[in-house]
Image (cartoon, rainbow, N blue to C red):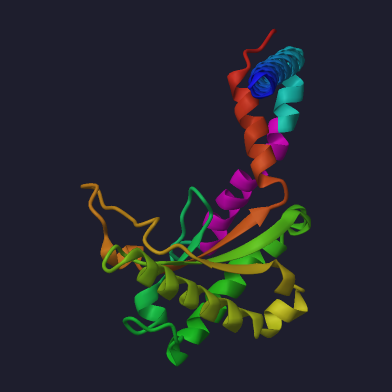
């Protein structure tokens, strides 16, 4: 009887000891977790401080740019605006042209039958002539020719139907136009194959009238646009320059 009681006491002791160790281990894990979280917070604060310092340094640097330097930088960032102005003058009123983005606009009703992505035979001649005039105007400018990065063909629809249905149709139409343009001798002679890309936009960029209502006829279109190298970077630089007050 005494032996059994001793065994029970020993078992009880080890159970208590085990519980104690488990409790201590749990506390240890909590401490480690707290230290880890604190290190993350501190690291985040240090990173935030570093970014603030970099931003302040950039602001100071931009403030020290003279007005003359700003004019020179803006002359570089304004290349696309100059190109658009030249395109507007050279293309005239015979071609639908977005004077803000420099995009060439072609009505889908002229290029395709309703719901189709097969180019109309009678539309190919017009598409060819318009493309050659548009890109030819760009290539005639040596500065633009060297900076030309992409020629983008975008398909657009109106808002009738589902987004996915229109996305598929707009993509197929953009690809159809690109494939035709790739077959042109003009494209091959000027090594434009690598510059041409196509994408469908569904009804994401519909065109509205003066009453802010969708113009379904104008919304159904193909757009051909150009991108210059470092377009985005130049745009951001110009925005920064405009936001920084002159020190002179």
Q: Is residue 83 magenta?
A: yes
Q: Residue farthest to the top?
A: 248
Above or below: residue 225 compared with residue 36: below
Position of 115 relative to 32 (above/below): below
Nearer to the camera, 158 or 184 = 158
Of residue 13 and residue 145, the one placed in the foreground of this image is 13
**Residue 166 at x, y = what percent?**
37, 69
Viewer-closest of 29 and 227:
29
Query: Is residue 44 visible from the viewing direction of this image?
Result: no
The reply, left or right, for residue 69 in relation to residue 129 is right
Q: Quadrant of residue 146?
A: bottom right
Considering the image in quadrants, where does the N terminus appear? top right
Q: Quadrant of residue 235?
A: top right
Q: Check if residue 196 falls in the magenta segment.
A: no
Label tally: 0
Quadrant, the C terminus: top right
Residue lying at the far front of the rendered structure: 1
Q: Position of residue 106 (x, y in %)?
A: 44, 70
Left-right relation of 25 to 200: right
Decide if residue 46 is in sight here.
yes
Residue positioned 75% across, 74% down in the render: 190
For residue 245, side relative to residue 211 (left or right): right
Report whether 96 appears left or right of 187: left
- Report the magenta stretch's main SS: helix
- Foreground of the two, 169 or 174: 169
Span of residues in magenta = 74-91
Picture residue at 63% right of the left edge, 25% below the top = 240
Q: Position of residue 50 (x, y in %)?
A: 75, 16
Q: Position of residue 42 (x, y in %)?
A: 71, 14
């Amino acid at each position: 009887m005494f032996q059994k009681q001793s065994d029970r006491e020993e078992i009880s002791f080890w159970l208590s000891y085990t519980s104690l160790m488990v409790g201590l281990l749990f506390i240890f894990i909590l401490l480690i977790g707290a230290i880890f979280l604190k290190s993350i917070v501190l690291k985040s604060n240090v990173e935030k401080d570093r970014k603030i310092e970099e931003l302040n340094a950039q602001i100071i640097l931009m403030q020290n740019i003279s007005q003359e330097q700003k004019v020179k930088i803006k002359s570089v960032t304004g290349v696309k605006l100059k190109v658009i102005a030249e395109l507007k003058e050279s293309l005239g009123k015979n071609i639908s042209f977005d004077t803000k983005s420099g995009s060439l606009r072609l009505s889908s009703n002229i290029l395709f039958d309703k719901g189709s992505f097969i180019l109309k035979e009678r539309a190919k001649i017009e598409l060819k002539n318009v493309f050659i005039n548009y890109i030819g105007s760009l290539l005639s400018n040596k500065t633009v020719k060297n900076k030309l990065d992409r020629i983008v063909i975008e398909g657009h629809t109106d808002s009738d139907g589902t987004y996915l249905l229109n996305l598929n149709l707009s993509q197929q139409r953009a690809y159809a136009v690109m494939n035709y343009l790739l077959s042109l001798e003009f494209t091959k002679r000027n090594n434009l194959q690598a510059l041409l890309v196509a994408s469908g936009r569904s009804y994401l960029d519909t065109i509205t009238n003066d009453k802010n209502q969708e113009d379904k006829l104008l919304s159904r279109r193909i757009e051909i646009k150009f991108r210059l190298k470092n377009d985005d970077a130049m745009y951001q630089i110009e925005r920064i320059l405009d936001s920084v007050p002159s020190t002179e």
